[in-house]
Amino acid sequence: MWSILIVFLLSIVAYWFTDGLIPKLRDLFVKAGLFGVDLCKTSKSKVPEAIGVVSGCVFLVTSFLFIPIAFGNGLMDREHFPHNEFAELLAALLSICCMLLLGFADDVLDLRWRYKLLLPTIASLPLLVVYYVNFNSTSFAVPIQLREWLGTSVNIGFLYYVYMGMLAVFCTNAINILAGINGLEVGQAVVIALSIISFNLMELRGDQYKAHQFSLYIMLPYLATTLALLKHNWYPSKVFVGDTFCYVSGMTFAVVGILSHFSKTVLLFFIPQVINFVYSVPQIFHIIPCPRHRLPKYNGELDILQPSRALIPKQDMGFLSNLILKILTVLRLVDRVEDKESITINNLTIINLFLIKFGDMTENKLTISLLSFQVACSCVAFLIRYPMASYFYDS
Ligand code: UD1
Ligand code: MG
């Protein structure tokens, strides 16, 4: 357990380092043309963008420095060096590193959505190869109630690799589309990271302690650097995190979920992101028009946020968009205004939905409300994972 203590101490250093580095590099990013305008403020000043690359680099460097410490015993006794575990850690860091590079490319080049789906798939390949070599376990445990028909486990073979690849794509993009107000991208990542770390600590005394230790090796430096980033990204944001941060975060969560064998639990910590993704599907797949930005509309006079809207010309509406609008209307999940030629609806994100259900509010209050929802969902996830899981599974 001393190795966890060392990674914890290294993480504290990483926090201080990231916290000091971000203000020093801000002007450099603006000079390089990497900046955005805060769409929820009256001031149109340049806010440095893609600062996630700074916290991501410190996170990776901390993890690299930790390698000789984690494998110190193996280095002394090279005959018994744990090559499998070493390959796992290297593949995990390679996948995260790939995502950092690809995410930064996206921030600089503003790639199209189809590439945003392709990039995490490519970056997850090293991970999948190591998974194949080290574990190649492609079975799902079957709930007790279904065992009579399906047996104790179901082997889905190659489809398991498709599932893991899709997990990486989902985790990276799900954070990126629940974004647009100060502190939300980083805040949700902090809550998810804290949930994973709590889960690891609870499981550290179990049979799978090695897997949870591995997860802590990655999650602790990630959390530390992300907390430092949050300090600068919190309302009013002095820096924007960029897609780099969303990609690195999503891949980090996918990596620990896959290699430490708790990918379903990781998904449980993504409940708000899953809801936001399902709600966004009609716009993401362009069944309903999707503007470049779906973040709430800023009312400068009152300094509050209001739901942003998308316009759908009636002549463009097909069977599917009609059906989706009807379902959303029946479920009271959409605020629609109709005239002769068009229908306007709120952009389909839970950020706008919160504003519809709870009324217009300030940006800071909206971020805090959404993060409180994320925390509440993590509590539900723990309830599902512990008391309820024992009803469906043996242990
Ligand atoms: C995703 C969302 C988009 C949302 C955007 C906000 C989808 C399909 N895409 O796009 O709807 O508007 O994220 O990040 O859901 N910004 C702020 N305040 C913030 C954070 C960002 O005003 O707190 C603005 C800034 O102008 C910044 C820009 O958003 O420059 C960054 O957007 P980007 O991350 O490039 O958007 P996408 O990830 O493509
Ligand atoms: Mg983004």
Image: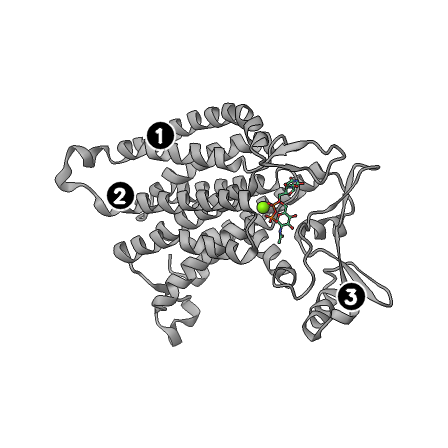
Label 2 to label 1, Cα distance in Å? 19 Å
- Which residue is depicted at the point 39% across and 40% down? 218
Type of amino acid under label 2: Phe
- Which residue is depicted at the point 36% across and 42% down? 93
Say which quarter of the image contains residue 12: top left
The first of marks 3 and 1 along the sequence is: 1
Q: Is residue 195 visible?
A: no
* Residue 242 percent across, percent down from the top left: 56, 41
Tag 1, which secondary structure?
helix
Q: Which mark is residue 131?
A: none
Between residue 116 and residue 172, name the one nearer to us: 116
* 2 or 1: mark nearer the eye: 2
User: Where is mark 3, residue-wise?
Assistant: 313
* Residue 213 percent across, percent down from the top left: 34, 41
Label 3 to label 2, Cα distance in Å? 56 Å
User: Where is mark 2, residue-wise?
Assistant: 86
User: Where is mark 1, residue-wise?
Assistant: 5
* Residue 144 percent across, percent down from the top left: 41, 67
Between residue 331 and residue 313, name the one nearer to us: 313
For the C terminus, give its image quadrant: bottom left
For label 3, count other residues whose C-alpha is less than 10 Å away and answer few (under 14), some (14-19) or many (20+).
Answer: some
Furthest residue toward right: 340
* Residue 28 percent across, percent down from the top left: 54, 28
Is disc 3 in contact with disc 1, using a CB cutoff of under 8 Å? no
The first of marks 3 and 2 along the sequence is: 2
Tag 3, which secondary structure?
strand
Label 3 to label 1, Cα distance in Å? 59 Å
Type of amino acid under label 1: Leu
Say which quarter of the image contains residue 77: top left
For the N terminus, give its image quadrant: top left
Q: Is residue 132 left or right of residue 200?
A: left
